[in-house]
Each structure stands twice: as structure tokens, then as C-alpha cells.
Image (tube, rainbow, N blue to C red):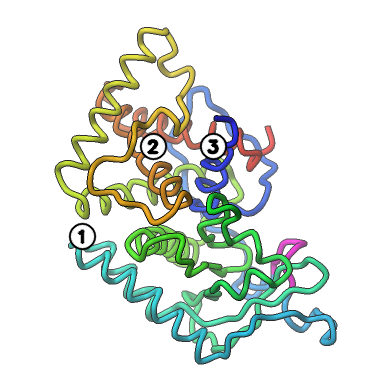
């Protein structure tokens, strides 16, 4: 059970696009909605600010660079495939924001290839940046797992492995096109990560502030769950609501309501219609349903005349998850 919990944590963190530690604090008492403030840096400063384990291609010693076997044309096909998977999900759901994000991806995702040297993660730009909304997109296929520093994006024993991530500092997205996850769920998560890319580049908010970060994650997850509801229909919504009611009753009986939240193992077997391709996809789907269930519980059972108090409670759920997975330092 502990191993399964850790798998869910890894996947949840990956989907949220969190790669680095954030050192500032977050108060869980008397929380109010975060004010999203622009990052006070120029475009050039923002583009040049890279974490210590990410380097630009020209910072490598050329003879030490390792890269994938795919040609630029082959990697371009992966970028096109990613857009098509997003667009399919967006159109099937009929969600206007999803359709707009798929269009944003098409216009602003600039192709890059993965490179590494001495354990450092990097990318080599293959397309020219044309405006400040552009971001790097590094599509990976199975051959790239042999590249040092990129193997963590691929499953081991068909279970763990990152689902992909958007890195605000690098302004880039790394995404594995792996057969372990179906095109539908890849499309859903690509929309999630593209939402981060859009908001980080258009709003320039301070993502290093844990409070702000949690609220932006909350907005992105609520978008993802809305799309899921439109995709999977009434049976899915009924399943999520029933799970939320059962968890609420259990927490209330144990006097733990608002004090502790159950992990993803609390979700019953997937509802009929969810046929996962692998154990990794089972974990990916259950993680999404688990968080959707907890948010539905808060919406259904926490009553307040102040809507921000409801949002605060959801943000605290995310914060507690990030603390548990060592994303934030307490």
C-alpha cells in the first residue's frame, strides 16, 4: 500500500508540473485568495533564469553531449501528434477553453530536442522563438529513455515514471509519448500542462510563492475536471459524487473532517468504461479521479457564504499534498 501511495504522489506531482523546491512559507490559517502578481523581471531575465540542473546547449562541452536518435522531422511528428491528441480531447469535450488551449499550443509550442551531459537535463532549440508566449516543447519517445537525465519520464515495471511536466523557469514542457498511456489521457494531461504554459507566459505570476502556486494549480485542476466530466458523462459524475459522499461520511464518523484527507487508495476500482492500457495508466486515472473526488467533497459538504473559503479549503488540500511529497519546504 505504501508503494502504491508513493506512485500516486509521483504522478500527481508530475502532472502538476512541479520540478523544483520552493522555499517560502504558506499559512494554512485564515487563508485568503492569493493575489496573483507579475514577476518583476524582464523577458530576457526570465528566459535566462535556469535552475541548477538545467543547462543550455551552448553550456555543454560538445564532446559530452548526449541526445536522442530521432531526427528533427521525426520529433516534429511527435509535436504534431501531441497537438492532435489535445485537439481531439478538446473537440470531443466541446469545452471552449480546451479548444483555445489546443490552438495556443499549435501557435506557440516550439520544437526542441532532449540533450544531457553529466546528469544535467537540457534541450536544444530546433525552432525560432517569435513572441513572448512561445515555449519549448520536448517530445520524447521510448528511445529517449536511454538519454541520461530523461529516463525518469518513462515507467519502470509498468508503474512509475513521470507523466510529463511544464517547467516555468525553463519555459519548456517535456512530454513522453509513451504507449503506457492512451491518447485520450495524454491529451487531457497535455491540456493541463499547456494551461500552465499559457498562464505563466501571459500573466507572469510569481509561481515560486506557494500560496499563489496552489491557487493556480487549483484553477488548472478544476479546468481538467470540467473537461473530464464533459468527456465521460453522467456515469463519471455520479461515480465521483458517490465516492465523495462515502469519504465525507467516513471522515465525519472518525472526526477527521478538515483535518486529514485519504489517499488515492480510497477510490474504489475504476468505473465501467475506464479500460486502462497499463498499471501506469490506472495510477494516472485514479490520481485524477481522486483529486476530483476531494474537490467535489468540499463543494458538496463545506458550506460557506464566502466562496473564497471553499476555494481556500481546496488549495489547502493541494498544499498538504505538496508538503507530503517534499515540493515545498515547511
Q: Which quarter of the image is occupied by the C terminus?
A: top right
Q: Which residue is drawn at 68% across and 47% down?
A: 21
Alpha carbon distance from label 1 to label 2: 20 Å
Q: Position of residue 266 (x, y in %)?
A: 41, 28
In the image, taking residue 209 as reference, residue 23 lies left or right, namely: right
Q: In which quarter of the image is the N terminus?
A: top right
Question: Which label lies toward us, 3 or 2?
Answer: 3
Give the percent coordinates (x, y) of residue 112: 58, 81
> Residue at coordinates 40% horizontally, 33% vertically from top-left?
314
Gap between marks 1 and 3 measured at Cα: 30 Å
Which stretch is magenta?
49-55
Front residue (pair 134, 300)? 300
* Mark sitting on residue 290: 2
User: Among all residues in the image, which is located at the extreme left?
Assistant: 234
In this rendered view, identify the residue nearer to me: 134 or 88: 88
How far from the left and from the top, in percent, is residue 274?
28, 49
Residue found 22% across the figure and 42% down from its top = 236
Bin the neighbour count of mark 3 within 10 Å (Cα to Cα): few under 14, some 14-19, many 20 and up: some
Q: Are marks 3 and 2 in contact (CB under 8 Å)?
A: no
Decide which of tag 1 and tag 3 comes sooner along the chain.
3
**Front residue of 283 and 172:** 283
Q: On screen, 152 above or below 170?
A: above
Element class at badge 2 = helix
Frontmost of labels 1 and 3 is 3
Instruction: Count numbered badges in the picture.
Output: 3
Residue occupied by mark 3:
4
* Local crowd size for mark 1, using a 10 Å CA cut-off: few (<14), some (14–19), many (≥20): some
Give the residue at mark 1: 93
Amino acid at each position: 500500500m505504501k508503494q502504491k501511495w508513493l506512485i500516486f504522489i509521483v504522478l500527481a506531482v508530475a502532472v502538476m508540473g512541479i520540478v523544483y523546491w520552493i522555499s517560502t512559507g504558506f499559512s494554512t490559517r485564515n487563508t485568503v485568495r492569493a493575489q496573483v502578481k507579475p514577476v518583476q523581471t524582464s523577458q530576457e531575465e526570465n528566459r535566462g533564469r535556469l535552475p541548477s540542473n538545467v543547462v543550455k546547449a551552448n553550456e555543454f562541452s560538445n564532446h559530452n553531449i548526449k541526445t536522442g536518435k530521432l531526427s528533427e522531422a521525426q520529433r516534429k511528428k511527435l509535436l504534431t501528434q501531441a497537438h492532435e491528441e489535445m485537439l481531439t480531447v478538446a473537440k470531443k469535450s466541446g469545452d471552449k477553453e480546451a479548444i483555445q488551449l489546443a490552438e495556443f499550443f499549435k501557435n506557440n509550442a516550439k520544437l526542441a530536442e532532449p540533450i544531457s551531459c553529466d546528469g544535467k537535463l537540457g534541450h536544444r532549440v530546433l525552432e525560432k522563438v517569435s513572441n513572448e508566449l512561445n515555449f519549448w516543447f520536448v517530445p520524447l519517445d521510448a528511445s529517449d529513455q536511454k538519454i541520461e537525465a530523461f529516463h525518469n519520464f518513462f515507467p519502470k515495471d509498468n508503474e512509475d515514471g513521470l507523466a510529463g511536466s511544464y517547467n516555468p523557469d525553463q519555459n519548456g514542457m517535456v512530454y513522453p509519448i509513451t504507449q503506457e498511456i492512451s491518447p485520450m489521457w495524454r491529451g487531457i494531461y497535455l491540456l493541463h500542462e499547456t494551461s500552465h504554459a499559457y498562464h505563466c507566459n501571459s500573466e507572469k505570476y510569481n509561481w515560486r510563492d506557494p500560496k499563489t502556486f496552489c491557487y493556480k494549480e487549483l484553477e488548472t485542476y478544476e479546468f481538467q475536471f470540467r473537461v473530464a466530466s464533459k468527456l465521460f458523462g453522467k456515469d463519471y459524475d455520479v461515480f465521483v459524487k458517490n465516492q465523495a459522499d462515502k469519504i465525507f461520511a467516513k471522515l465525519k464518523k472518525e472526526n477527521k473532517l478538515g483535518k486529514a484527507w485519504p489517499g488515492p487508495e480510497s477510490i474504489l476500482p475504476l468505473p465501467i468504461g475506464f479500460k486502462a492500457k497499463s498499471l501506469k495508466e490506472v495510477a494516472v486515472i485514479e490520481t485524477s479521479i481522486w483529486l476530483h473526488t476531494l474537490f467535489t467533497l468540499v463543494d458538496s459538504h463545506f458550506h460557506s457564504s464566502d466562496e473564497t473559503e471553499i476555494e481556500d479549503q481546496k488549495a489547502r488540500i493541494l498544499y498538504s499534498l505538496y508538503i507530503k511529497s517534499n515540493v515545498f519546504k515547511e
